[in-house]
Amino acid sequence: MTLDDLPTPALLLDLDRLEANLARMAARAQSLGVALRPHVKTHKCVEIAERQRSLGAQGLTVSTLEEARIFAEHGFEDLTWAYPLPLSRLAQLRTLPQQIRLGLVVDSDEAIAALEALGRPFAVWLKVDCGYHRAGVDPSGPAAVALAERLHRSPVLTFAGLLTHSGQAYHARSQAERTQVAEAERRVMVECAGLLRRHGIPVPRVSVGSTPATSAALSLAGVDEARPGNYVFYDYTQTVLGSCRVSDCALTVLATVISCQPGARHSVVDAGALALSTDRGPQHGSPPTMGEIFEDYDSGRLHPDARLVSLSQEHGIVSAPLKVGQRVRILPNHSCLAAACFDQYHVVRGNQVLERWKIWRTR
């Protein structure tokens, strides 16, 4: 089968680019002296996780309890659910097989109390705010010490260490700014660990990570593991941030032009919000886009005039007239969300469709 045989919209995964991205990040983690625990929310795919493991990944990061269950069923038993524990999921935690090593994340007394009442000896990370200000304790505040002390002394739980996410790296405007974010993340976490140790609280591990920060870090001294996820595919946002080149991007959406009226300055493709999501991409990107269109995929050249400027559920409005029936390859703003819109990857090399891999997007 070739790309010409696929009905659209179709999710394409370039195998050569994927494998190059996996190898590059594995080598980077090794050079920085940290374990790699990749975040599989990006791909939700067993075949990709197996490749990450073969390159030395030491466990996986998941974003939902169902992801944890699915990957455990496929032989991955060292997992971190890097999400503040939803207390509504306690009943489901009781049903997890005992052999699954699932690390949980908390940043409140309420969550710790609920886990202790559950009675299972989970390893629990304390989430720290390294500057993103979404969740996590103040790294220098009394709550960090009090919650870590409670975890350390818990008769039921094991204190796994400190965990953070440098989401603010997605607002960086240059390589230098991403490097600054990565260093700030490292410094905040090392200093927080030092604070706890001065209070007599052992900190077994320190975990950091985002793709733009990990890609730009000059040092991760004092850190034990990194948890990037998006690097397997990259996307248009990462190209604007400088994390990768366009030619590194492994995930695209194949679409077909379905309408272009005479005299019109736009055209319509059959890929809308349910194929690309409505992520608006980097806010400092220019011009605004809902997805870029390749002029030449092999060379990594984007079309200078044609891009998606508006999405409805199944329609995508392109900023230039294109011929009805023409097929276009779209680079999503956010590959994690685009992948979550589909049930399978069409794994390709050149124009050839090699395999189909399931996307386990069950919630």
Image (tube, helix red, strand yellow):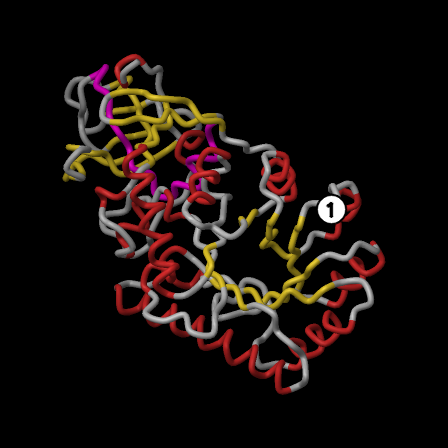
- Residue 48 located left or right of residue 133: left
Depth check: give the residue in front, 29 or 248.
29
Q: Quadrant of residue 276?
A: top left
Q: Against 53, is 191 above or below? A: below
Which of the pair 269/137 is nearer the observer? 137
Vertical side of 67 occupied by 215: above or below: below
Q: What is the x, y in percent for residue 311?
A: 37, 33
Residue in the image at 66% along x and 56% along y: 104
| Kind of element beneath mark 1 | helix
Q: Is residue 330 magenta?
A: yes
Q: Name the residue carrying label 1.
A: 89
Which part of the image, by quadrant, shows the N terminus? top left
- Rendered-image quadrant of the C terminus: top right
Residue lying at the far bottom of the rendered structure: 198
> In this view of the protein, which residue sits in the foreground, 257 or 216?
216
Determine crowd level at label 1: few under 14, some 14-19, many 20+ residues with C-alpha closer than 10 A.
Answer: few
Q: Residue at x 27, y 16 (%)?
A: 2
Q: Quadrant of residue 187?
A: bottom left
**Percent position (x, y) of residue 25?**
35, 52
Residue at (78% x, 41% y) in the render? 95
From this view, report whether residue 151 is shown above or below residue 122.
below
Q: Which residues are magenta?
A: 324-342
Q: How many marks?
A: 1
**Residue 192 placement, left or right of 331:** right
Q: What residue lies at 59% left-to-right and 34% top-to-bottom?
A: 74
Inspect the image, locate mark 1, and give the three-letter code of the amino acid beneath it.
Arg
Q: Is residue 193 magenta?
A: no
* Picture coordinates of residue 248, whole percent (x, y): 26, 44
